[in-house]
Amino acid sequence: MLEATGANGTPRIVLVEYFLSEDRALVFGITADSPEADLVTLPVARTEVRALAERIRAELAGGRPALGGLLREKLLTQLVAPVTRWARPGDLVYLVPHDVLHRLPLHAVPVDDGVPLSRRNAVVVTPSASVLQYCLAKRTERRRDSALIVADPPSERPLVFAREQAQAIAARLGSTRMLTGGAASRAELLAALAAKDATPAILHFGAHGVFDPDEPMRSGIELADGRLTAEDILGLALDVDLVTLAACETGVSDRRPGDELIGLTRALLYAGAPSALVTLWRVDELSTSMLLRDFYAALAGGTSKAEALRQAQALLAERTLADVVAHARESRGRLGDDPAATAVLVREEARMLARSGDGEAARRLLADTLLTPGLSAPDLELLRVAQKQIMLAGRAADAGARSQVFADPYYWAPFVLVGDWY
């Protein structure tokens, strides 16, 4: 689907704002050509929405890809249905959530014929209409030619695909600086941002994210020399076009009276970034790697951020096991000189081969890799455990090279764009 455009070449924008009260939900919709906002009142109590949000949170905490069923529940489809009353297919939709809706992937809720809203329309989120105005005022001439990438700082759980993402992004963009491993630190990052002669267009983080519900301003990104917190970010002056937080729960914020949000996203916007790409829950590394590859490819081709995300999410949902095996193999080729990375990537490739029905190829790949020089004891253990799991699991119910392994919203829906759509 191409971006629907108005007379001035920009998409027709529809703003949809929610308010949850004790016994009903109010949904307001307005467009630039509307004389006034339209209102839909729904018999949906705030406690019902909070209860469903808690069920979804529990499902996500278990790491099980079964989110699609919960998003089809009547309560959520009722809340999202009014969007199609105001937005035509191809229009750009801005959602202004309220209360616990800030933590739910409303863009993934089915609308027409069971199709998720984000297939029908590019969707952007804003904490409020006033914050949106602030973000739009920060817009500068579109720049997509440079990036500062902070990826895979030392941790107990190395993020192999974060390094793979870094290399894939670097291949798409012109001028790229990467801070990885021990160099992925607060000190190096702040020094790089202070170099005014080389301000990046995109700031990309591939690291572990932490949400602190007790002290939301202590939420942040774990770097080599400590956590970069929301409080730290508020003290920065970010002259960038986009900040991507390819980490866990970076879009989750604490709510305060008046529905004011506190957390990383709000800090990034106030620090000067017109847009932030953040996550609502703990993301799967492999699927995230594939989604971001397509997102940055679209950006490099001149597509808007909102449409690039819409396209990347749609593509990921359609990726087959054969596609995923090919991606894991390609990633292994890029990081083949790192034994620890090789072990992780081989495990993923073998797991997907087994699911596609080629268990023999999966076992052979693992057995050959176990003979690779330089593997540490933990690397060897990881591969041996994978061998046992594949032997015990047998063929998955959804096996087959053409099966769509990331179709559930658990994989493609955690990422949301906040702020400027352009």
Image (cartoon, grey):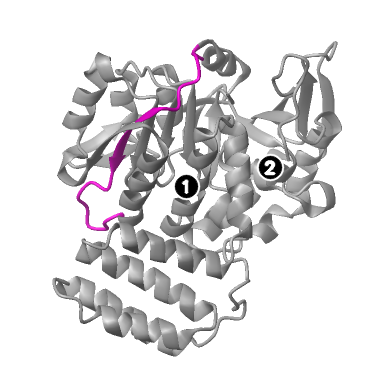
297 versus 145 height, above or below: below
Residue 319 falls left or right of residue 38: left
Q: Main secondary structure of the magenta part?
A: loop
Q: Nearer the viewer, residue 384 or 149?
A: 149
Q: Nearer the viewer, residue 318 or 48?
A: 318
Q: Which residues are magenta?
A: 138-159
Is residue 272 magenta-colored? Answer: no
Q: SS class of the residue under badge 2?
A: helix
- Residue at image position (27%, 58%) is 157
Q: Amino acid at mark 2?
A: Ser
Q: Position of residue 261 (x, y in %)?
A: 49, 27
Across the whole image, how many numbered discs are drawn on residues? 2
**Is label 2 or label 1 in front?**
1
Q: Nearer the viewer, residue 307 or 221?
A: 307
Q: Nearer the viewer, residue 199 or 107?
A: 199
**Which label belongs to residue 118?**
2
- Residue at image position (61%, 63%) is 66
Residue that numbered label 1 is attached to: 293
Residue 413 falls left or right of residue 369: right
**Which label belongs to residue 277?**
none
Residue 262, image quadrant: top left
